[in-house]
């Protein structure tokens, strides 16, 4: 989608739909408020009667479409709910709802009247970003394998009007930055949505090379022979059952600030997860192409960081493997030696994400000496049970790092909830025959024991683990509960969040 910014009033420009926000009205609010006066001018003689008949109430998810006289387009009124509860996230969701409401209705261009979405608690720059997010992500569909589809909105413009025209330069910078970031989000969604018959570990490595060439970052790919020389027993074990061998992929962005810190971003890239010999139930397998979402998010993060010249140096690491059962698969009871020499007792081959990450984390800490490490992984169903489908779990060894990520989560609408990590959880992953075990006999604290497992491969480096198993993709069964900007399929959760953290340098 093409994004634009215009200093004029939305009503004087020819677009297929002018979009405005409406806050929820009280029971005694009968007179048309001054805030809707400009919208009333767009559809003379229509809005005031609709208001009087209480056809427009401003409730959340309420969408009212009024046609302008003479076939000159439409006015779309979006309910924003109570002003007291309004945030940029509400604007983000409402923008996506507008785009979705206009799909297949002949509306190619739309314009947001910025002033109707701005409040004291939702400043103009944050709202501009939110409207862009909602429009672009709400319009996104995975169409690579579709022979036909309904046309939708192709161009969205934010109209400043007299209220915000003086802020044009700053708001244009915010929109341009968000536009670049959204390109990376859409690219990430495309990669995650690509099915496993195409998206093998080798293909994912080639996609990293393409992105590296595009944005000018160094890319190194370690194949199965090199991984064996490096003693990466974890990733080799998980990928051993597939005809598509594993890959460890490293992307290096040099950073936009001289002498800046180094942030390592590590992602789980299981291109398909059958569970291995510890086979998943059939109904759980169709979505397992999404098990590479963490590694794909790393691709999007590095791409955005390089294009936006984020201050820190960023090292992205993708641990890519396909987990399938065969005569060469790893087995429950196997003992695996990882890159940093620590050993894993394998008790469940479906707890494979932490096994591939053990090599990736040990490698990046040893080779690049990062100031902090962030890993993203669709790691545990336990985290989904604890937090639901729309929120990621955060486990962190460093309060400053955790606070920075939580702040970025709030700014981007990609919610995180910090979970505890105690000696109780660390004791649960200790093994009698190895350093750690990848599964426990206790059916409790699954997300936390997974975090305790990963912690052992990071050492003393400040570290944060993002379990994105819930919000990484949207299924038909969860679709109705998710924001309108999360279409069915991959969400690219974590790309906007972690990039925002890098751009803000952890503030």
Image (cartoon, rainbow, N blue to C red):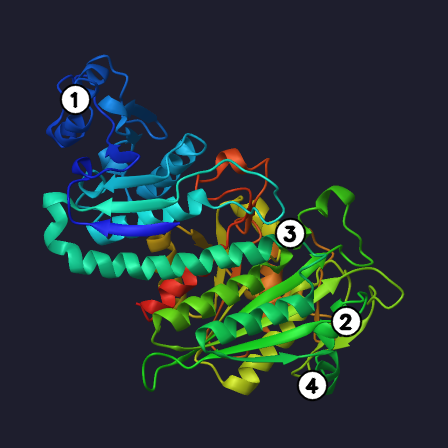
- The residues tagged by marks 1 and 3 sit, at their Cα atoms, a distance apart of 61 Å
Please indicate whether residue 383 sits to the left or right of residue 166 in the image: right
Q: What residue would you read off at disc 3?
A: 444
- The residues tagged by marks 3 and 2 sit, at their Cα atoms, a distance apart of 26 Å
Helix, strand or loop under label 3: loop
Label 2 near label 4: C-beta < 8 Å? no
In front of the other: label 1 or label 3?
Answer: 1
Residue 443 percent coordinates (x, y): 69, 51
Comes first in the chain, label 1 or label 4:
1
Comes first in the chain, label 4 or label 3:
4
Numbered circle sitting on residue 230 = 4
Observer-nearest of 384 and 135: 135
Label 3: how many Cα within 10 Å (few below 14, some 14–19, many 20+) = few
Q: Which residue sits furthest top?
A: 53
Numbered circle sitting on residue 237 = 2
Q: What residue would you read off at disc 1?
A: 44
């Amino acid at each position: 989608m093409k994004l634009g910014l215009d200093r004029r009033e939305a009503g004087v420009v020819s677009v297929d739909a002018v979009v405005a926000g409406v806050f929820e009205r009280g029971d005694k609010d009968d007179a048309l408020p001054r805030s809707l006066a400009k919208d009333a001018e767009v559809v003379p003689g229509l809005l005031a009667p609709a208001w009087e008949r209480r056809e427009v109430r401003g409730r959340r998810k309420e969408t009212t479409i009024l046609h302008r006289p003479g076939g000159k387009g439409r006015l779309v009124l979006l309910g924003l709910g109570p002003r007291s509860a309004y945030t940029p996230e509400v604007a983000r969701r409402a923008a996506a709802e507008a785009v979705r409401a206009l799909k297949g209705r002949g509306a190619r261009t739309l314009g947001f009247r910025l002033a109707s979405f701005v409040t004291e608690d939702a400043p103009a720059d944050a709202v501009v970003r939110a409207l862009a997010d909602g429009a672009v992500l709400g319009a996104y569909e995975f169409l690579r394998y579709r022979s036909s589809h309904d046309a939708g909105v192709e161009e969205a413009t934010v109209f400043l009007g007299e209220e915000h025209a003086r802020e044009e330069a700053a708001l244009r910078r915010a929109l341009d930055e968000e536009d670049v970031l959204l390109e990376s989000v859409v690219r990430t969604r495309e990669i995650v949505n690509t099915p496993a018959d195409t998206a093998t570990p080798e293909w994912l490595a080639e996609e990293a090379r393409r992105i590296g060439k595009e944005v000018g970052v160094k890319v190194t790919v370690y194949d199965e022979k090199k991984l064996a020389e490096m003693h990466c027993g974890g990733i080799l074990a998980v990928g051993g059952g597939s005809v598509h061998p594993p890959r460890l992929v490293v992307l290096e962005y040099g950073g936009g600030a001289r002498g800046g810190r180094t942030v390592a971003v590590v992602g789980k890239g299981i291109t398909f997860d059958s569970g291995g010999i510890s086979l998943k139930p059939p109904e759980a397998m169709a979505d397992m192409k999404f098990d590479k979402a963490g590694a794909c998010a790393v691709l999007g993060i590095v791409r955005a960081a390089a294009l936006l010249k984020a201050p820190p140096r960023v090292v992205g690491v993708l641990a890519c493997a396909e987990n399938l059962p065969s005569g060469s698969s790893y087995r429950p009871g196997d003992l695996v030696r990882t890159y940093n020499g620590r050993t894993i007792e394998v008790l469940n081959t479906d707890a494979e994400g932490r096994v591939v990450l053990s090599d990736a984390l040990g490698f990046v800490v040893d080779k690049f000496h990062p100031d902090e490490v962030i890993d993203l992984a669709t790691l545990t169903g336990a985290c989904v049970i604890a937090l639901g489908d729309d929120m990621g779990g955060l486990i962190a060894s460093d309060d400053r790092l955790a606070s920075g990520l939580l702040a970025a989560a709030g700014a981007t609408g990609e919610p995180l909830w910090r979970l505890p990590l105690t000696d109780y959880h660390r004791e649960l992953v200790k093994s009698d025959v190895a350093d750690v075990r990848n599964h426990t006999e206790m059916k409790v604290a699954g997300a936390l024991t997974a975090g305790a497992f990963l912690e052992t491969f990071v050492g003393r480096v400040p570290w944060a683990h993002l379990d994105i198993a819930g919000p990484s993709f949207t299924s038909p069964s969860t679709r109705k509960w998710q924001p309108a900007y999360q279409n069915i399929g991959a969400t690219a959760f974590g790309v906007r969040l972690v990039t925002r953290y890098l751009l803000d340098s952890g503030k």
